[in-house]
Image (tube, rainbow, N blue to C red):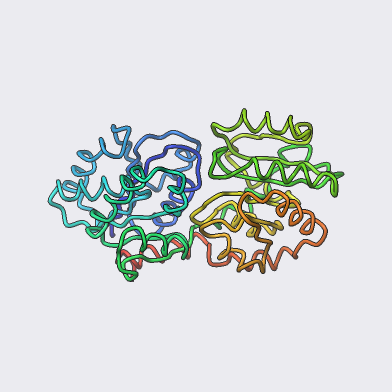
Amino acid sequence: MKRLGVLISFSGDGGVERMVTNLCAEFANTVQVDLLAIKSAGGHASRVPPTVNLIQLQARHAWTAVPEIARYLREVRPDALLVAKDRAGRAALKAKRRSGSEVPVWIRLGTNLSAALERKDAFSRWLRVFPMRRIYPHAAGVVAVSQGVKDDTVRVTGLPESRVHVIRNPVITARLAAQAAEPVPHAWLADKTLPVVVGMGRLTRQKDFPTLLRAFARLQAQQPSRLILLGEGKDREALVQLATELGVAECLLLAGFQKNPYAWLSRADLFVLSSAWEGSPNALTEALALGVPSVSTDCPSGPIEILDRGRYGALVRIGDDEGLAAAMAATLRAPLPAPTLQQAVDEYRATTSAQRYLRLMGLLE
């Protein structure tokens, strides 16, 4: 039986952690899987299935983990190593060189780096990009989660297009429908006297929830409604303050991190993605998979691909709360049928995604 090592830092409750645990669960049906975990913070670490061999590294950072990764490569000699996130990928390539191993290292990139670095100064951008241009040619290849991430990665790293491969995220799992059908988690979702809008993700600048709050405040004049945000993060207090200033605090629920967000999401009347940048937004994909009408900012990268340039949901300029409010109102008035939305994301099934990874890495015929 082939053996695959997977390296990730469980640094929070984000989409990357969720996608990697989904992948590992699927990989384990076909190959032996060693999940090398740097830290185990956040709720997703607890979701690692028992079929996966979880190896907790002592290091607390990718760079200090290099000796442990090198020892693993030298002693275990897996058939391939898949690494999530850029810094961990560079650390793995350094460990490979140190170990003298011939194990192919594949790097999975889940965000549009150019957009993420847009507000950084020139030196900070160079500090992030230069090592990628120097080190990434030593990887067996790079997996991008969307065409937008691939295009950006090719520009940033200088790698030929043939070395960067697009594989959609393993969003739709066998458990999704069962999780969505679990008991109603909040009275607002049982009492539909008012429509419920849901946003989901870390409460950070990337997700731009202030724009969603402003759009939601505008929406109240046309359609009184309620807003639930699923996720945790450093911007919580600022969002509470903004909601108070906008006069919508009474119809806002900051529900925090939810181990099963799908029981919430499946009962929403509308899902909104307000992000400033993404790689391939899992929450938007999950909403469509559950048949929930959705609107999104046209941020790099992913929404334009998932929504097929507006065919399956409106796309709005980043930061345009007025346009977002109009799109929200229009979608609540005339939502697309659930089967139409669900067919849009058929390619994002976890089994399909995992098989494509294994074939790319030479672990599946």
- Where's the C terminus, which quadrant? bottom left
x, y percentage for residue 102?
17, 57
The picture quadrant where one finds residue 291 is: bottom right
- Where's the N terminus, which quadrant? bottom left
**Residue under the point 56% across and 58% down:** 172
- Viewed as shown, does residue 355 lie left or right of 64? right
Q: How many marks?
A: 0
Q: Nearer the viewer, residue 149 or 349?
A: 149
The picture quadrant where one finds residue 295 is: bottom right
**Residue under the point 23% across and 40% down:** 66
- Viewed as shown, does residue 128 lie left or right of 344? left
Residue lying at the far left in this picture: please name it. Answer: 100
x, y percentage for residue 208?
59, 44
**Residue under the point 74% across and 57% down:** 327
- Viewed as shown, does residue 159 lie left or right of 67? right
Residue lying at the far front in this picture: please name it. Answer: 122
x, y percentage for residue 277?
52, 51
Q: Nearer the viewer, residue 116 or 64?
A: 116
- Above or below, 354 relative to 87: below
x, y percentage for residue 302?
53, 60
